[in-house]
Amino acid sequence: MSGLRRVSTGAPWEEAFGYSRAVELPNGLVLVSGCTSIVDGEIAGGGPYEQAVNAFNVALAALKQLDLGREDVVRTRMYLTHARDVEDVGRAHKELFDSVRPAASMIIVSGFVDPSLVVEVEVEAYREAPQS
């Protein structure tokens, strides 16, 4: 598909598993892959709130490479391993996106590739086409 822009962050799994951190479609939609709290190969932040903030910051850094920011986010998905973490992850989401109010989903899953991870997030953003 022509007109796609792809972003890589250099994370080892991107190369090993063959994916991009973010892909911008010609229609202005930007899809950011699942992001966790792994920074420089280590889990940054221990609890669900900290992991959520870090994971969203990984996603926002990918958007920044495409000259987009949190104000361009139109949808978020939050995957949690425990229902008890809903409030903490929700608080992190509110702090980051309250003024933006994207469509959002919060889903309980059985686990992630590293059992120390309790949160993974996905973000979608939109770039309006320039007026001609």
Image (cartoon, rainbow, N blue to C red):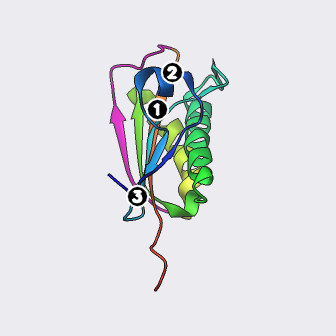
- Magenta region's main secondary structure? loop
Q: What amino acid type is highlighted by mark number 2?
A: Leu
The reply to whether discs 2 and 3 touch (Cβ–Cβ < 8 Å) is no
The reply to whether discs 1 and 2 touch (Cβ–Cβ < 8 Å) is yes
Q: Residue at x 62, y 22 (%)?
A: 46
Picture layout, residue 6 above or below residue 16 = below
Would you name the residue on which mark 1 appears? 120
Would you name the residue on which mark 2 appears? 117
Which image quadrant for residue 18? top left
Secondary structure of the residue carrying tag 2 is loop
Asked whether residue 68 is in view, the answer is: yes
Would you name the residue on which mark 3 appears? 3
- Does the magenta run of residues contain 107? yes
- Does the magenta run of residues contain 131? no
Q: What amino acid type is highlighted by mark number 3?
A: Gly
- Say which of marks 1 and 3 sits in front: 3
* Badge count: 3
Q: Residue at x 33, y 20 (%)?
A: 110
Q: Between residue 82 and residue 60, name the one nearer to us.
A: 60
Which image quadrant for residue 9? top right
Picture layout, residue 20 above or below residue 63 = above
Q: Residue at x 32, y 51 (%)?
A: 1
Asked whether residue 118 is in view, the answer is: no
Q: Which of disc 3 and disc 2 is earlier in sequence?
A: 3
